[in-house]
């Protein structure tokens, strides 16, 4: 799972990150210390669970909570035990009172796993912002990503989505089957039909391969001997 930790107390955030890294199913752990950074990370997509401190400067934790897409599991981290009385308003999975200990963290983590359920083993999705809309993109239907100035184009089997987010922001949030093949392109290895010279055939599209990325691509997309 890709985990986003939001806490302005870096020591608390690092402790939760350390706990997350002890679990078997944590693929990536990102720590940010303010609400604005949390909103940017959520907009970039690829987040599977959020550990959210409510007491944040400027953009508060409750504002971030309201912006989290429906269905994304959230564990609230707070210094105030009375939040439990209001937690039903936000449909959070659990809440942890600081200081957080390992045993209590693992109980919350188990609740996250139960909330995600069997669907967690199926096709993953990311949520991106397209204009004023939040759009869910199924990664198994995503062919490639194409950078255009400040935007990224998500080219899927059946549609195209444009989002104001950079490839650099997205790259670390994508699962291993997505590989950078050009400074402007990331492709889904499982969707490549053909590689010839410096071009990839993927669906009805041709994607260029940059010399800088060619060697790594050939390692990942190699014939059976």
Image (spheres, grey):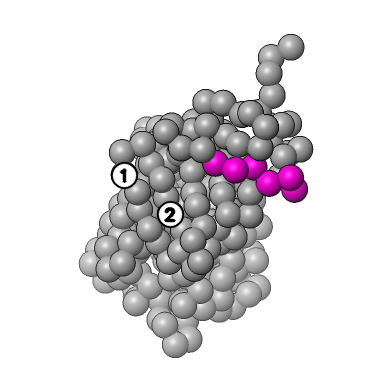
Q: Which residue is the extreme one toward the bottom?
A: 58
Look at the numbered disc 2 and give the secondary structure of its residue: strand
Closer to us: 178 or 79: 178
Q: Bin the neighbour count of mark 2 within 10 Å (Cα to Cα): few under 14, some 14-19, many 20 and up.
A: many
Instruction: State the mark number for residue 153.
Output: 2
Residue at image point 31% right, 55% down: 135
Is 225 placed left or right of 22 in the picture?
A: right
Question: Does 155 appear above or below 49?
Answer: above
Q: Can I make out residue 108 in this image?
A: no
Residue at image point 31% right, 67% down: 131
Q: Position of residue 201 (x, y in %)?
A: 52, 32
Residue 93 placement: quadrant:
bottom left
Q: Bin the neighbour count of mark 1 within 10 Å (Cα to Cα): few under 14, some 14-19, many 20 and up.
A: few
Tell me if residue 208 is in the magenta stretch.
yes
Range covered by the magenta-colored residues: 207-212
Q: Which residue is the extreme one toward the top?
A: 225
Residue at image point 74% right, 45% down: 211
Instruction: State the mark number for residue 159.
Output: 1
- Looking at the rendered structure, the number of numbered marks drawn on it comes to 2
């Amino acid at each position: 799972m890709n985990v986003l930790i939001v806490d302005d107390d870096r020591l608390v955030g690092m402790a939760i990150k350390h706990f997350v890294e002890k679990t078997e199913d944590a693929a990536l752990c990102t720590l940010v210390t303010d609400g604005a950074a949390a909103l940017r990370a959520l907009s970039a997509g690829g987040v599977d669970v959020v550990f959210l401190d409510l007491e944040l400067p400027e953009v508060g934790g409750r504002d971030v909570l309201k912006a989290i897409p429906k269905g994304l599991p959230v564990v609230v981290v707070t210094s105030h035990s009375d939040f439990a009385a209001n937690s039903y308003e936000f449909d959070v999975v659990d809440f942890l009172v600081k200081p957080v200990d390992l045993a209590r963290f693992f109980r919350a983590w188990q609740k996250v796993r139960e909330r995600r359920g069997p669907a967690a083993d199926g096709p993953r999705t990311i949520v991106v912002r397209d204009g004023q809309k939040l759009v869910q993109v199924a990664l198994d239907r995503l062919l490639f990503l194409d950078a255009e100035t400040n935007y990224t184009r998500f080219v899927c089997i059946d549609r195209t989505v444009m989002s104001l987010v950079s490839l650099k922001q997205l790259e670390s949030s994508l699962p291993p089957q997505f590989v950078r093949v050009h400074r402007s392109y990331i492709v889904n290895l499982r969707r490549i039909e053909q590689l010839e010279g410096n071009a990839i055939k993927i669906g009805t599209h041709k994607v260029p391969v940059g010399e800088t990325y060619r060697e790594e691509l050939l390692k990942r997309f190699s014939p059976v001997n």
